[in-house]
Amino acid sequence: MDKPRGWQREREKCKQLTVLPTRTFRTSNSRCSHVVVVTVVVAVVHDKVRVCLKASDSDTTSNFCTPITMLGNSKRILLKPPTVLDIPEVLDIISSFNDRASNARCARTCRAWSDVALNHVWRENPPLKALLELLVPLVPRAEASEEKNRKLVFSRTIHPSDWKRFNSFAKRVKHFTLSHSEWYMHGRLEGMIHDSVLYEVSMTRPGVCLLPRLKNLSIEVESECFIAWLQCPLLFMHDALSTISIKLDEVKVIDAALPLISALLGETLCRSPHLTRFDLCVPLSTRHIESDLGDLLKGLLCLKELFLSTCMLTSQVIRSIANLPRLVTIGSVWDSYGSENKLDVKNLQAPETKVAFPNLAFLSIQSQVSSITRFFQSTGAPQSLVGLTIDTLFSYLPSELQSCLEALAIACPMLEYLEFTLSADPLGTDASAESITFSVLYPLTSFLVLATFKLASAYCVDMADRELVGLIKGCKFLLSFHLNSEPIYDSKTSLTLGCLALLAQGADQTYLDELSVYLDATKTDSLPQITKQITFERISFGASPVSKTDDLLVYLSRLLHSSCEIDCDSFLTQEAYDMLSHPYSREFDRRTQKWQEIKKVLPLLRKVRQDEKVFIQLKNEAGEAESDSDLDSDLGMLKHQYLLLRKIKKTSELDTKLQYPTGEKQRKRKLRTSFLTFRHD
């Protein structure tokens, strides 16, 4: 077909103008099939800026549409100035803050908003029922006896035209979760989909995968009645899938679930060999699926992240993933039933190859401490670790912990994060006779860039105050130090509040921001003099014993900076808390409750002390010298004020009295009056 003459005349007209090209896009004529490329140009005519369009030949089209205006007989095409909402990127950012219902309403507003809004409606975890109803409406099954538990079926058969409508929405789905939680309403199953629906979908689908652009697939089976649904993920797997997560919860029928899980692992390797992340959390012992899991992991050459249930990282699984070139993270998903299979990981063996785990940076492992020591002493141990988490599921001695730290310092000197967690009862007897001393933790100083160390153990940390300060100074880049602030057994320790005063004196030599320690807070009589304040961001005393709360509050108000926060959150897991003996569990709760009270009152006491310092400064400016006896009387007055406030519980009254004007002179005048009034009260 010949080219339209109007476009030819407009092209000759644009050649005679001095133009500046600003943007190129494509458009097509509505009356013919000829496609042209249009370039926006700016022409200066009579000191006025005119916007014109310049056309040229092309064989491709674009989805970009711009409104244009014809000006009478001049045949000049002017471009309508765009608005902010004409930019698709801006619309995408705005739609990301809306919920699904709001984006659905935006999709019905206009064509310019429809495409962007629909992407957000269907991008993440659309309901399975909504996806299937794009094909054919679902209705309750007529043959069911009970109306409440009737399953949903298609109202008619699927026609080829239904797939055309389905594919226009299916290509927008990027993340999909196959879960049955959407069918539980008011504690019972309602609107459950019948198995014949998925069978008809699998038999009539035009392609291999239902969601061709799916990136993340998650399967959650929450009951034994849904075990047969483990075959359903095969409909959504394809070659471009990057993440698969499989989770079985409260499934105890091992004989029924085992063959389906084995088949699912085998099909995963065939259908999605380019996975970058794989999560598996199943209530099965690893020995039942060890061979199938090993074959799957060995074939995933693009795998970067691997997360397994507790006690699933056995010696055979380690040998299967030792040669993966891109593996960076091996994580663990804690579950209550995983610790029952701890015998599978009691004796770990490293791979025999010398070049194992070339890019592994983060590792979470479960075994006994002595086995982990042998693992890192072998030639096949990972050498480039940055973060390491060790779950101690078996009993060990402090000397074994020292040997493990020495082996880690040699094998992984560039370790930045090291954590020993307590997931199960490691001891059958009382551990009060043993303790973790300074010599046990001294190998920490051999790590070059250690920034975080966390220790949760049944043993109590027992060392002198200066030894703790020397240990922290030896780890030059230490930022967070959690030193078993909540031991399982009630033991005595030599650490006191004096270690905090020593840390404050050498604060310039460390980078420490977080400290969690178990110390004896009952000794408040012979504490060192405070010369500097501690400027930590967070400090935790765990279950440290407390006797004189008043003296402790006064000391902490002088020692801790106003930016330092006392953290009362427990680091113990529920399993570790259940290990506490009955008499000690009551004492444990009483101590933690006391520290919570200290956390509430300490900011108020800091404010009173700060205002008292200003009051003393005002007295010095007036020529009234303050003697040591006066300072002691002020300190006693401060304790008296706290006790009074604690009895009558009128802390808000003090806050009201300490609200001062913004002016300096008025503030000092108001301060003198209000503080003297408070003293008199």
Image: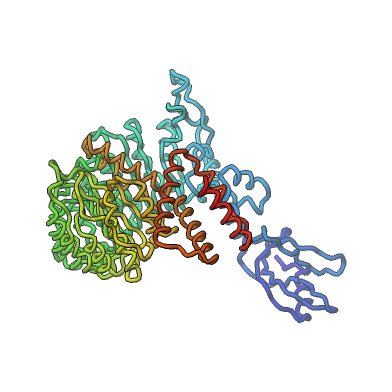
Residue 200 visible somewhere in the drawing: yes
Q: Position of residue 628 (x, y in %)?
A: 39, 61
Which corner quadrant of the image does residue 416 belong to? bottom left
Residue 326 appears anywhere in the view: no
| 549, above or below 387, in the image | above
Q: Nearer the viewer, residue 404 or 45?
A: 404
The answer to whether 167 appears left or right of 395 in the picture is right
- Foreground residue among 423 and 3: 423
Residue shown at the point (12%, 41%) measured from the top left:
429
Q: Residue at x 52, y 47 (%)?
A: 680
Relative vertical location of residue 575 with respect to residue 560 in this rendering, above or below? above
Q: Is residue 56 left or right of residue 120?
A: right
In this rendered view, identify the residue nearer to me: 347 or 141: 347
Q: Residue furthest top?
A: 145
- 228 shown above or below 672: above
Q: Residue 485 appears at what percent x and percent y?
A: 27, 51
Q: 235 or 490: which is nearer to us?
A: 490
